[in-house]
Image (cartoon, grey):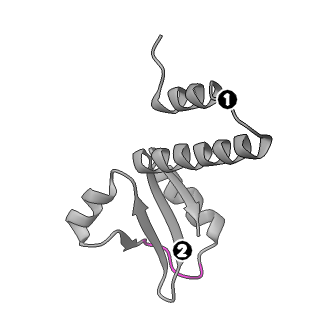
Amino acid sequence: MTHSHDEKQADEAANIQYHSADEQDAAENKLAVDITSDRQRRVNGITLSRSGTGWMATHTGPHAADIIRLFCTVTIPTAFTPQADPQMVLREIQANNPDALVVLA
């Protein structure tokens, strides 16, 4: 059975002997941040924000390089006006980007 990088990190953390509960809490919090950061680097993300001219999409993760190559930026306008309902914008962008984690800023 193979383990993912995240599972290996968690297994290693579980086998460490700590001198205090505070030390263990600090190590577990650091592990959680490390795992989150690692996942963010591997997961395509789109953060939606409303500007004065419309809704903008800021791209992160592996696909950001493609966005930069195409548009010379990671933040690109969407087709939605500033008056568009945030939940509707989120829903539509998610539907068109099923492999990305889409969030509202």
Q: Name the quadrant of the C terminus.
A: bottom right
Residue 103 placement (x, y as % from top left): 57, 60
Which residue is at the front of the view, 48 or 34? Answer: 34
Which residue is at the front of the view, 24 or 71? Answer: 24
**Who's the residue at 43% across and 68% down the image?**
58
Give me the disc on residue 77.
none
Residue 20 placement (x, y as % from top left): 77, 40
Quadrant of the image occupied by residue 87: bottom right
Which residue is at the front of the view, 76 or 5? Answer: 5
Residue 61 placement (x, y as % from top left): 39, 53
- Dominant SS of magenta comes to loop
Disc 1 marks a residue whose amino acid type is: Gln
- Residue that badge 1 annotates: 17
Q: Residue furthest bottom?
A: 52
- Residue that badge 2 annotates: 49
Mark 2 Cα-neighbour bin, 10 Å: few <14, some 14–19, many ≥20: many
Q: Residue furthest right?
A: 21
Say if mark 2 contacts mark 1, CB within 8 Å.
Answer: no
Quadrant of the image occupied by residue 85: bottom right
